[in-house]
Amino acid sequence: MTHPVALQFQPVSLDDIAAAPGRIALLAAGEAPATPAARRLDRLTRGGVKRALASDAWARMKAGEGLELTFPGGLQAEALHLVKLPRRATLAEARKAGSTLARGLNDKPTLVLAEGHARAADVSFGLAMRAYDFTPHKTGEAKATGPVTFAVTAPEEVAAKAGPLAALVEGVFFTRDLVNEPANILTTDDFAARLAAMQELGLEVEILEEEQLTRLGMGALLGVGQGSESPSKVVVMRWNGGGDAAPLALVGKGVVFDTGGISIKPAGGMEEMTMDMGGAAVVAGVMRTLALRKAPANVVGLVGLVENMPDGRAQRPGDVVRSMKGDTIEVINTDAEGRLVLADVLWYAQERFKPAGVIDLATLTGAIIIALGHEHTGVFSNDDAFCDAFLAAAKAEGEGAWRMPMGEAYDAKLKSRIADMMNVGGRDGGAITAAQFLKRFIQEGTPWCHLDIAGTALLKADSTLAPKGATGWGVLALNRLIRDRYEVK
């Protein structure tokens, strides 16, 4: 997998600044050099730092943005990067500052003069997140990133804060790698193997093959994958760090490629359907994070891995399948396949684990992109307190999420002439009727949230903490929700 940039924390040494190679970065708050390191840099550059901080360009900058001085006199470093960060910066500002630093990294060492800034660990997190680069399929010499050293007043204290954040970065990178991987590489077999490898981290991993899924009655899930050469699977990952408490269940849609099946998609843009396993990738990233940071919580992650292909054996519009729950479903559109996968995995999760709550994630509908664009994930829920807790976690982590309505009028649109329900309810309110479909597979009394991440899992432009491509949206919010609500204190 993609490995985060190497970070280290060491005491501030003013005498080493002049000879530091590569790049030097300074976190600065105001219009004058205010810290010992800033004053030393100013003397070495013969007032260059003071002039830069007094400039109009610096005054116009927002917190987290930076100004670069190349080949500064008096320093061996090739560049001096001044990044604006108030002493009482917010979490978002600190992470943005780290992101700004990451954009200037190269193969040379970087020294970040953070001194006693309270948000130094958060700056390091933003840097690590934004430094992600997916390169396994690019030929030629690999582009190396030089080591990054944070010079801080209390290195052991900052390193202790950065430890859990490093686990979070690795979980996000695991998610991004899975979403970015092409479908000829990330088959259902390969996906399952990557999850099974996490047993070395302490996760319990179980792979259910098609024969077992058939015995369980997962006709909805199996129908989706019956046109593919790749076998359908369900992978169960368990992290047991919370004693006897009922687990939180995370359920992810893992369609490794979605042609739409017989209801085939247009050719334009179909290459992006390698990301249709984004929900499963987020679940995997969260489980990896929990194992790496040894979270004192019980969480079970379940993913349904299938490929939706057109074939002589493929599911047809008009087919009727029977779910594990026992309900029959008329398949009106084979491109509404993700909800069929989730229906069976959701039911299995509840029947087997009796969870304290269930959250499913899926790149489920284009309709949610029409509604919310790429700024927010659509959130649907049957439990106000559960939903509010998730929304609070997402807000705290800066991951956009917006609650959407549900109701009987939307549910009625799923009525079928020949089966218990249809898998689609028409174009209007498409994201909502998809959620209503899933709600039919949530048992009475089980708190549930459905997260439609179709607009947030993959972006065509850079974001603050990620280059264009897979974002890893959801790993941060779910990790915080688990930390705040489900960990044994």
Image (cartoon, helix red, strand yellow):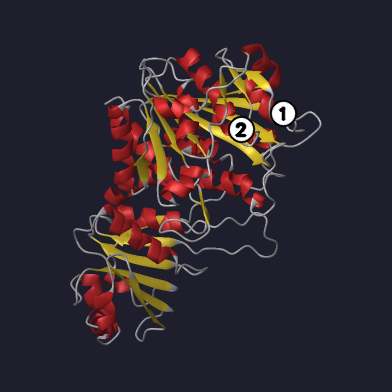
Q: Residue at x 39, y 33 (%)?
A: 380
Could one spot residue 97 in this view of the protein?
Answer: yes
Q: Which of 188 and 366 is in front in this view?
A: 366
Rate crowding at label 1 as few (under 14), some (14 to 19) or many (20 or more) other CA atoms within 10 Å: many
Q: In which quarter of the image is residue 303?
A: top right
Could one spot residue 160 in this view of the protein?
Answer: no
Query: What is the distance, in whole Å, between disc 2 and disc 1 at their CAs?
Result: 10 Å
User: In the rendering, at what x and y percent does residue 458 appear?
Assistant: 52, 50
Q: Which residue is drawn at 53% across and 47% down?
A: 176
User: In the rendering, at what x and y percent does residue 322 appear?
Assistant: 63, 16
Type of amino acid at the residue the image marks with label 1: Gln
Say the numbered circle drawn on residue 315. 1
Q: Which of 395 and 115 is in front in this view?
A: 395
Q: Mark 2 points at which residue?
A: 337
Type of amino acid at the residue the image marks with label 2: Glu
Q: Which of 48 and 251 is in front in this view?
A: 251
Could you tell me which quadrant the C terminus lies in?
top left
Pointer 2 with pointer 1, Cβ within 8 A: no
